[in-house]
Amino acid sequence: MTLNIAYIVAETVWGLLAHSLSLLSDAGHNLSDVLGLGAAWLAHSLARRAPTSRFTYGLKRSTILSALGNAVLLLLVTGGIIWEAVMRLADPGPVAGRVVMIVAFIGILVNGGTALLFMRGGKEDLNLRGAFLHMAADAVMSLAVVVTGLVIMLTGWSLLDPIVSLLVCFSIIVGTWSLLRASLDMALDAVPSRIDLTEVSRALCALPGVEDLHHLHVWPLSTTETALTVHLVSTASVTEQDVLLREAGQLLQARFRIGHATFQIEAPGAEYPCAHTASC
């Protein structure tokens, strides 16, 4: 965050001096990156807090809200840059190509290096994926700005500056859309995309002593943790039920990475009203 803030200040100053929308738009994305990194950091800290009598699951969902906020913020900033680029098409103005190249090349190092820090964690954690996409998007934009600066320096064609800004913005929107959809699904308690609810039902029904099940619900507690509740219909004795619950919990953790499971054992033939059903 500190490195990116320093780069934002330098990029903004040189962008104004060089009359480069590419540099200024890149600085705008860097600003959204800093805000995104701050949100991801805050959410990660909040998620580690212990549950309380008011927040009985803790504040783990803040990681989902952070990922959603990152996606929305990136789209809003990109939209603003698109507007400015369209205005600049009518009056491109002179652009200092050499300055644009040098400053943007530094941006590749800053943004690319930061993105690499989040690459591995972003595969499993949507919150980190949001931070990674922010930094990777700016690294790509910085690369495009370097090429733009080179072409402008060689040809003097200033109109290329807003054109490249538009192309990069559209590519960022395409890349951000999946993050927006995934984070919105999580915020609405959708079953995580990596989990097949039918497979979960089959696996639980295959356990010894389980005759049927219903009230099966799966939802994300955070970007990395998943919860489950289910009613299991079983003829098992009290002693056998303890074994069943232990095996069911181990199964869900090992096969589906569901670490917070709650089970209710019911006798066969009992009538329980159920709005959301799943059966063996």
Image (cartoon, grey):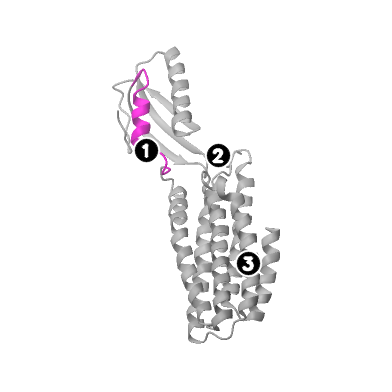
For the N terminus, give its image quadrant.
bottom right
Mark 3: which secondary structure? Answer: helix
- Quick check: 213 left or right of 41? left
- Quick check: 193 left or right of 271? right
Mark 1: which secondary structure? Answer: loop
Q: Which residue is mark 2?
A: 57
Work out whether residue 111 or residue 266 is closer to the camera in this orientation and state it.
111
Camera-near label (1 vs 3) is: 3
Work out whether residue 160 or residue 247 is closer to the camera in this orientation and state it.
160
Q: Residue furthest front?
A: 154
- Quick check: 232 left or right of 50? left
For the C terminus, give its image quadrant.
top left
Q: CA distance from mark 1 to mark 3?
A: 44 Å
Q: Which numbered tag is attached to residue 196?
A: 1
Dot 2 crowding, Cα within 10 Å, few <14, some 14–19, many 20+: some
Tell me if I can see residue 119 in this picture: yes
Q: Which residue is mark 3?
A: 105
Membership of 208 in magenta stretch: yes
Q: Residue at 41% of width from left, 44% of height from top?
A: 193
Residue 169 x, y percent position in the rendering: 49, 68
Dot 3 crowding, Cα within 10 Å, few <14, some 14–19, many 20+: some
Membership of 24 in magenta stretch: no
Mark 2: which secondary structure? Answer: loop
**Residue 174 in which image quadrant:** bottom left
Mark 3 residue type: Phe
| Mark earlier in primary sequence (2, 3) | 2
Q: Which residues are magenta?
A: 192-210
